[in-house]
Image (cartoon, helix red, strand yellow):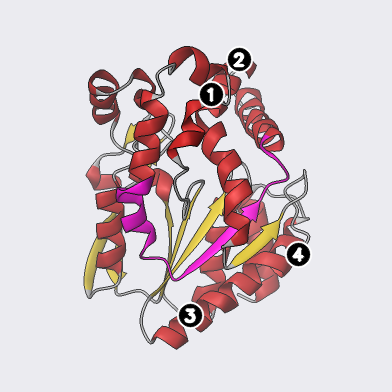
Amino acid sequence: MDDEAELKRFIAEEGLPDSFRRTVELVCEPLAARAHRRRIDRKRCAVVGLCGAQGSGKTTIASYTTRLLEQRGLRAVALSLDDFYLTHDARLRLAKDIHPLLAVRGPPGTHDVGMAGAAIDQLRAKGKVSLPRFDKAADNRTPRGTWATVASPVDVILLEGWCVGAVSQGRAALATPVNALERDEDPQAVWRTYVNDQLDGPYQGLFARLHDLILLEAPSFEVVALWRAEQEAKLRARGAGGMDEAQVARFVAHYERLSRWILAEMPGRADWVIPLDTERNPYV
């Protein structure tokens, strides 16, 4: 299948607007080229991190970029940090033992970073790797029999996630709540301190495996909240569940502190920053 036919099929499969072609031109193709160069330079598997706020299109970009790499004859895998969420029961235990807000998936401390790191290491070695999948509708990991199996080693791993490559804040910054959720439900800063400490510890061990860090830079956190609301409205319109406006507002509040910190801090050190407009279109 030629490149144009492959792109047309992908756009149709994913229900994407035709404007995705520009994203392919400005992001996916250069990203594939970067990853290919990293593979050549290293003479072994290259691990590329793709950070982007909720609704920024990172999963779609990672998916199509892996297709481009495969067209170049490379073995490429896109991993989502979301697929390494702790199980529902494990998060309930954290909620009981540490803080109730840890029952909500998303922030650092709610992923199995050991499993994620092991998956990356296994993908770089010879063998076969089973990759977990998380069902967000069920809020739980799917049965192991549903997991995809990948022959390894692979040439390129794209690790995408909303906090991939993030670093912790200074302790002083945690003292002041950023929203009503933190003020009313975490008045002693127990939850946000735990999240920050997890990011400073186990998550840095995972992110140390990255050879390149790419940031899809949203215009602001306010735009990110609108993107999430749009996603949920589409789910409701399709009869596929979806949170109402009040539920969305509460959910995104869990992400606000770190999302704002990433937008403030990461552009100064990421290997490639891709600014997005309010419609998620890149303007690099």
Distance in Å between CA atoms under marks 4 and 3: 21 Å
**Outermost residue, top side:** 184
Q: Nearer the viewer, residue 132 or 93?
A: 93
Q: State the residue position of label 3.
A: 38
Q: State the residue position of label 4.
A: 284
Distance in Å between CA atoms under marks 4 and 2: 34 Å
Residue type at mark 3 is Arg
Do the numbered discs 1 and 4 sit on residues whose CB atoms are within 8 Å? no
Q: Is residue 211 left or right of residue 69?
A: left
- Please report the residue visible at 24 percent of the width from the left and 46 percent of the height from the top: 145
Residue type at mark 4 is Val
Tell me which numbered mark, 1 or 4, is placed earlier along the sequence.
1
Do the numbered discs 4 and 3 sit on residues whose CB atoms are within 8 Å? no
Q: Is residue 214 left or right of residue 123?
A: right
Distance in Å between CA atoms under marks 1 and 3: 40 Å
Q: State the residue position of label 2.
A: 246
Do the numbered discs 1 and 2 sit on residues whose CB atoms are within 8 Å? no
Q: Nearer the viewer, residue 67 or 117?
A: 117
Q: Secondary structure at mark 2?
A: helix
Distance in Å between CA atoms under marks 1 and 4: 34 Å
Tell me which numbered mark, 4 or 2, is placed earlier along the sequence.
2
Q: Is residue 182 left or right of residue 83?
A: right
Q: State the residue position of label 1.
A: 177
What's the magenta region? Answer: 200-221
Q: Secondary structure at mark 4?
A: loop
Do the numbered discs 1 and 3 sit on residues whose CB atoms are within 8 Å? no
Residue 76 at x, y = what percent? 43, 70
